[in-house]
Image: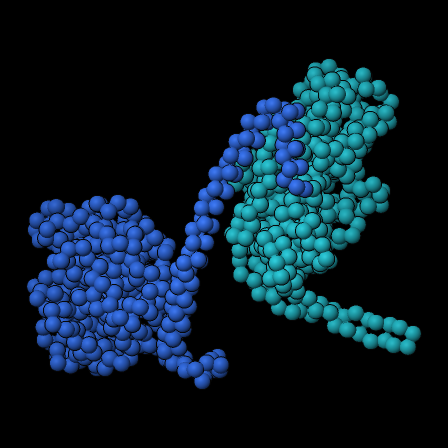
Amino acid sequence: MSLSNKIEEWMKEAEERPESAVTIVRLIARRLRELTERDEELLAENIALQNGTRVEEYQKRIAHLEYQLELIKRRFGVDEGTLVELPAQPVEESTPNLLVYNAQGRIFRIELNSDAKELGRITSDMSNDHEPPRILAVPSNEEALLLYTSGRVSAYKVSDIPLIELGGAWERSQAALPDEPRAGELLACITPFSHLPLSDFFLQISRRGCAKKTMTSLAQSILGNHYIGKGALQKSDQPFDLMLSRKQDRAVFATYEGKVIAFDVDDLSYAIEERIKLSATDYVIASFITRADDSLLFVTQTGKVIHRDSKSIETSKSSTAKGQALIPPSRLEQGVRFMGAASVQDSDSVAVLDATGRLQILGADSLTGSGSIAAEAWILSIGLIQTDNSLAKVANLRKVGESS
Amino acid sequence: MSLKVGIDFGTSNSGVAVYDGGRVRVLPVDPKNVLPEVIKTVLYITKDYRAYLGQEAVETYYRDNVNRQRRYVKQWAGEIEYRGADLFYMRDIFVYVDELKPGRLLQYLKTALRKDNYKGTQIFERYYSVGDLAQTYLSLLKKRAEDVLGETIHAVTLGRPVKFSESPELDSKAQETLREAAHEAGFKEVDFELEPIAAALDYEQSISQPQNVVIFDFGGGTLDIAVMRLGDAKSRQVYASGGVDIAGSDFDRAIIEKRMLQHFGFGKVKHHPEIMQMIEAVPDWMALPEMGTPINKNILDKAIQAKVAPVRLKALEHLIYNDLAFTFYNRVEAGKIALSNDGATVITLEDKEISLWELYTRSQFESDIYHYLVDVEKVLLDTIAKSGLDVEQIDAVVKTGGSSNIPLFTGMLGRLFGAEKVKESNAFSSVVAGLAIKAFNHSSLVE
């Protein structure tokens, strides 16, 4: 039926029941508005097609996919010749590893044993200008992305970093130095990134609580140029963490003075944005992605563990939020500070480094149960070891604090 | 005393009610529905043979199916014997099965009872006869009612249309299938009452004087008419009853055939018989899911590539291959219902590849279903003539069932009997209320 016939029929209805005319006009007006909006979208699309930006976008997307394929091939040790026989290829065996690294780029790689609770002891001071070492659990076949405070990045296979013996006493000189920081820069963090193809964004967090998201489709350019940027608004600020996230993820960060804030990754703009208003002496000490059924652990320098449900942390939409305070003012005055935080499940484990250099593994359920960490001295750093670690679904944990 | 309930096993909606001698209580068997006393006659059976009904079935279906991934595999379905004068050979038959399909949604279960050519359906590895489907639905409904009441239900009075089918054999076969299904669902005693008579029992509660009443029960599957003397239980009498297979689902079909098919390529596609067959299957809720084969997808893709009505065929492909048929039928039905109150409505279906928008007016709807009005009026007058009464002798016309609210038919009743004689009743609960009264009276009589 042609449109003119339809219009005749609508007119007939309006003649038979004049009150229908108002409804018909309203419905047509609504449709007109929808069509106008759609027309505008199509015109914009047409312009993008004509001036070639759409072509460029697809070229970038293809390049990104090719890069992701390359990454996967590297991870599973597949070359072009064997790709056709992919199902028959043995997958590189993965073992859970722990990286303990400091700002000077020195990295201890320890192979975890399911029975070992006491991993060993770092006998020399790994801290750098009051910045304690950080801990990251990764599978041995993971790709690690090193982010420096200048905004520079470099990628390494975890398996390329030499192993040290479990249960020993380790000297600073035994630590590997795969890529020494250049003049004026420090190692900000190490990020596992083999699950790049499954992620939507790089999410950067700065010391002063700025967040910046970058589409993973730009990964090729970032890695090609070895540069992702500082992700900080002020000159004095510097990058603290880099993680991969998906659109629907919820990110949390905790600060030294006990403030916690959560926000939806999808709500972030692509520009650098300050997500929390911090006091002059405060800074971010942990950031992570959390799931609805996770528990959040916050650890003070004395080993006290504060436990909250992930849901109890309100999601902030505002960029001027001050965050939820988890340390009461009276305790703050007494000098209580957060050293680390993590989003855990009961089956997970936590690696703990104290000021004597002792590195031990504790069950997350035992921490939530007892409410404290039994350590010989102040806690310097903690690192989450997820139960599905071997699947490269690794949480990156950051802990920094004053040394005792 | 064993507990006995009335169940209205309707084509579109069902309900359960219980009567205690003073008050009818229609049970809230579907808490997720807008009206908890009304439950959609919809059954969803998952791959692991878990069954859901009502709103829960619809929600589970949407959650599991819409825009899901598909993977077709070739499965052996049987073999065909070829016999000729001097040859005999056998050939294997294969079908393409979507191995990722999470479940099957089944509706119009009551219509299936009276279809001669529909014996049942294969759901994954199991074959469900029409009786099995009715039994599955009734046993879940019984369980829901028992949960509400907190006690076991032993017996039921089931409603049935005046005629399941024009053919007496099919009519009695449908009732026996339903009886057997109810027994297998766990009801020890099962009896039936005609749906219009059940509606009359409910109406009788509201009158004080004996009256000649026409019950006009116009639901989703059939029109049932009863001419009765009501008002006094002793002199209650059914003068005549009649019915016809015209109802809400036919009107939905008429809307789709006349107004919707053009959005899926009807009129634009001329020389592609396979595609024409797919378009013509759109109004048929039983045939449309069967169209979703890889071969048909290939045909549609080729036609789209060749620019044969590409936008409309893409919409058709999306309708078939993204499990949007149920949403589509619901939108059409919602549009039809809206026209009972408004002069115009819009039927829309927006999805990735579909942008269907149709402004539909009441006068268009009335012209689309006008031929049904002629048939309905004829059946009504025939039934009254069969009763031996004149139209003037009718004191009231009680309309029940969702389709009875369509202004075209309300107008027809007003024209024939006078608008003041046309009485409204609760479109969805008057039949089930009457069935509960019948169940109570019957069980009291037995005891």
Residue beneath the point at 32% across and 50% down? A267
Q: Nearer the viewer, residue A404 or B361?
A: B361
Quadrant in which the C terminus of chain B appears: top right
Please indicate whether residue A402 sits to the left or right of residue B105 in the image: left
Q: In the figure, residue A298 lies in which quadrant? A: bottom left
The residue located at (87%, 72%) in the rendering is B83
User: Does residue A321 sit above or below A66 in this rendering?
Assistant: above
Compared with B192, A243 (above or below) is below
Determine the residue located farthest toward the front in the rendered image.
Answer: A51
Q: Is residue B191 above or below residue B137?
A: above
Q: Is residue A248 left or right of residue B219?
A: left
- Asked which quadrant contains residue A389, the reply is bottom left
The colour one sees for chain A in the rendered image is blue
Residue A387 position, x and y percent, is 34, 67
Residue B285 can be seen in this image: no
Instruction: Please name the residue shown 67% across and 47% down the image.
Output: B261
Residue nearest the viewer, comparing A356 with A149: A149
The x and y percentages for residue A7 are 63, 34
Query: Front-most of B33 and B194?
Result: B33
Q: How is the image coloured?
A: by chain
Q: Quadrant of residue B114?
A: top right
Q: Residue furthest bottom?
A: A81
Please identify which colour was used for chain B in the image.
cyan
Above-or-below relation of B344 to B72: above
Say which residue appears at 79% left-offset and 31% top-offset: B374
- Quarter of the image containing the N terminus of chain B? top right
x%, y% of residue A180? Answer: 16, 76
